[in-house]
Amino acid sequence: MKNSMFKIAFTTMLLAALLGACKPKNMSTAISGDMAAKAYVAPGQYDEYYNFVSGGFSGQMSVYGLPSGRLLRVIPVFSVDPEK
């Protein structure tokens, strides 16, 4: 009984310490974040990285541009696709 209560208390303190470290240092950092400007890729420009994602049971593979997050292409690998 004491051992399980110790585990719960330790886990709670660890979780509180980790969540406390996640908040921004000051409010100006949280409000003026330029993450959207950093992830923006103008139309016609190439992304820096490409993410090839399995479609799972759909039998397709998707290609996403990173950091823009645009869906570039869906490739039918093991699925019937009348367009291709």
Image: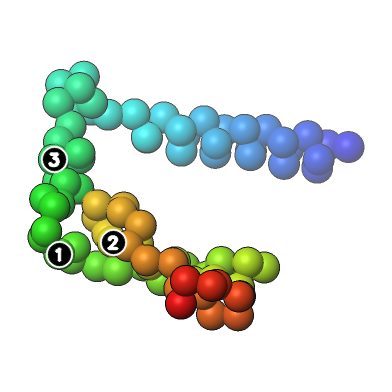
* Mark closer to the chain start, 1 or 3: 3
CA gap, disc 1 and disc 3: 15 Å
Residue at x 62%, y 33% (from the top left corner): 12
* Mark closer to the chain start, 2 or 3: 3
Whether residues under marks 2 and 1 lie with C-beta atoms below 8 angstroms apart, the answer is yes
Residue at x 11%, y 59% (from the top left corner): 44
User: In terms of secondary structure, where does tag 3 sit?
Assistant: helix
Are there few (<14), some (14-19), or many (20+) residues within 10 Å of tag 3? few
Q: Which amino acid does the dot numbered 2 rest on?
A: Gly
Q: Quadrant of residue 45?
A: bottom left
Q: Nearer the viewer, mark 2 or mark 3?
A: 2
Q: In which quarter of the image is residue 9?
A: top right
Q: Mark 3 points at which residue?
A: 37
Are there few (<14), some (14-19), or many (20+) residues within 10 Å of tag 2? some
Q: Which amino acid does the dot numbered 1 rest on?
A: Tyr
In the picture provided, is 49 more to the left or to the right than 32?
Answer: right
Q: Name the residue under label 1.
A: 46
Q: Mark 2 points at which residue?
A: 65
* Mark closer to the chain start, 2 or 1: 1
Q: Nearer the viewer, residue 57 or 9?
A: 57
User: In terms of secondary structure, where does tag 2 sit?
Assistant: strand
Whether residues under marks 1 and 3 lie with C-beta atoms below 8 angstroms apart, the answer is no
Asked if residue 77 is positioned above or below residue 17 in the image, the reply reads: below
Q: Which of 1 and 72 is in front in this view?
A: 72
Q: Which of marks 1 and 3 is in front?
A: 1
Q: Which amino acid does the dot numbered 3 rest on?
A: Ala
Q: Residue 20 carries which label?
A: none
CA gap, disc 2 and disc 1: 8 Å
Residue at x 61%, y 75% (from the top left corner): 79
